[in-house]
């Protein structure tokens, strides 16, 4: 039952796996020269869940509290398999045959052997180790870079809508709110005044936060939008599309096992994408709830924003509204309304933190 639930949970988060599982069939046993198992059999045998990336032929098993990353090799090939993001095992690699994954018996035995000496520390204790340790808040632009600008005439007065100022006002309050709610977490801002940290500096600030094992950081970049079309308005949230590859892994840590870096990257990539999407969904829900019909939702979108692409962590970019739209500009000039933005962002982040920490970092029970 545990395996079933775990598999179900993983399938919910990875439609790709569902598609794969549907096309997997079991080969007749007599055709096997070496004893192998189908995907279904392997999942049952190991009581594992699997996330599989067909493009990179790489996958990650979740076995209880452990994760095992591998790639598909040639039949009979020995290769590296990564346990819990650090320990490299050399095992007889899974391979694909007629589009189906096959797992050598020696692979299963190797996995079991590697896991057996690891003491069961108890699910509750293990779970409590997964936490969001830091939240990085990035008010877009700043200093010499004003970001998007809009000028409107409202009731006979000129209203200048400046992206960098809107972003900073919303982020300042958001940071204060998060610090009060989570005194044990590090809440960092990439800028606190009208300064211009470069995009590289912003990402470096985020990537330099020291993390313990099973701690995560989330990265939130806040912007205001602009369009040639003055009618364009509303808020939206961006995350990185799963097919975009990032250099997530610190190569120096794995100099002896360069070939596992792509696997580790694929593993983190999927994890971060899933988490980013969750944060985005929570924030959009809270925006809808907090802002009501005042400003429309443009939904969750995927794009290769630089700030987001290079952050080695779940990261999203929020566009609060359009400085080029008079209605949005008026709302974004109103301190009471900016407060609502901060509040909605705070609640969305808090929803994610609660879900992430409660689920033990999304590792299936
Ligand atoms: Zn911007």
Image: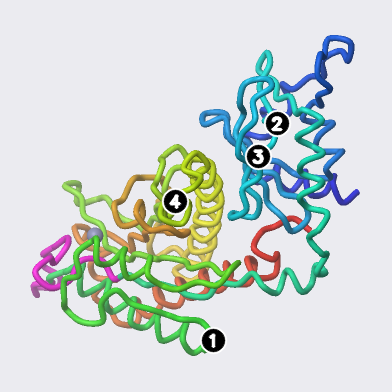
Gap between marks 3 and 4, in whole Å?
44 Å
- Residue at x 44% of width, y 49% of height: 255
- Please give the name of the residue rendered at 34% of the width and 64% of the height, measured from the top-left corner: 221
Q: Quadrant location of the C terminus? A: bottom right
Q: Is 151 colored magenta in this rendering?
A: yes
Write down the residue under mark 4: 299
Q: Is residue 1 left or right of residue 204?
A: right
**For mark 3, what is the residue?**
90
User: How far apart are the alpha carbons under marks 2 and 1?
Assistant: 44 Å
Q: Residues within 10 Å of mark 1 (few under 14, many from 20)?
A: few
Q: Position of residue 323 (x, y in %)?
A: 21, 62
Residue pictured at 64% horizontal, 25% vertical: 77
Q: Nearer the viewer, mark 1 or mark 3?
A: 3
Q: Is residue 203 above or below residue 30?
A: below
Q: Is mark 4 within 8 Å of ligand 1?
A: no
Q: Which residues are magenta?
A: 139-159
């Amino acid at each position: 039952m545990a395996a079933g639930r775990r598999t179900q949970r993983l399938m919910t988060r990875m439609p790709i796996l569902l598609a794969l599982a549907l096309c997997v069939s079991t080969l007749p046993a007599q055709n096997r020269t070496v004893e192998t198992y189908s995907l279904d059999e392997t999942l049952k045998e190991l009581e594992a869940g699997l996330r599989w990336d067909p493009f990179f032929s790489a996958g990650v098993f979740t076995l209880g509290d452990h994760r095992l990353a591998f790639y598909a090799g040639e039949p009979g090939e020995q290769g590296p398999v990564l346990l819990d993001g650090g320990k490299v095992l050399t095992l007889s690699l899974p391979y694909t045959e007629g589009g189906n994954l096959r797992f050598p018996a020696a692979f299963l035995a190797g996995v079991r052997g590697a896991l057996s000496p690891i003491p069961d520390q108890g699910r509750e204790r293990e779970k409590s180790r997964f936490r969001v340790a830091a939240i990085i808040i990035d008010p877009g632009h700043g200093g010499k870079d004003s970001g998007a600008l809009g000028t409107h005439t409202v009731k006979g007065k000129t209203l200048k809508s400046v992206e960098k100022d809107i972003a900073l006002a919303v982020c300042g309050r958001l940071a204060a709110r998060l610090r009060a709610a989570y005194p044990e977490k590090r809440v960092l801002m990439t800028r606190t005044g009208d300064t211009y940290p470069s995009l590289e500096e912003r990402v470096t600030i985020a990537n330099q936060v020291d993390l313990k094992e099973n701690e995560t950081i989330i990265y939130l970049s806040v912007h205001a939008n602009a369009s040639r079309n003055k009618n364009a308005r509303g808020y939206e949230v961006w995350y990185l599309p799963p097919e975009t590859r990032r250099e997530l892994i610190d190569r120096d840590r794995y100099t002896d096992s360069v070939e596992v870096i792509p696997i580790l990257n694929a593993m983190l990539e999927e994890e971060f994408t899933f988490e980013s999407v969750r944060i985005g969904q929570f924030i959009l829900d809270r925006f809808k709830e907090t802002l009501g019909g005042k400003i429309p939702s443009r939904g969750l979108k995927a794009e290769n924003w630089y700030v987001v692409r290079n952050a080695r962590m779940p990261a999203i970019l929020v566009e609060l509204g359009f400085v080029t739209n008079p209605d949005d500009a008026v709302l974004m000039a109103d301190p009471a309304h900016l407060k609502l933005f901060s509040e909605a962002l705070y609640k969305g982040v808090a929803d994610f933190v609660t879900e992430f920490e409660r689920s033990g970092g999304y590792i299936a029970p």
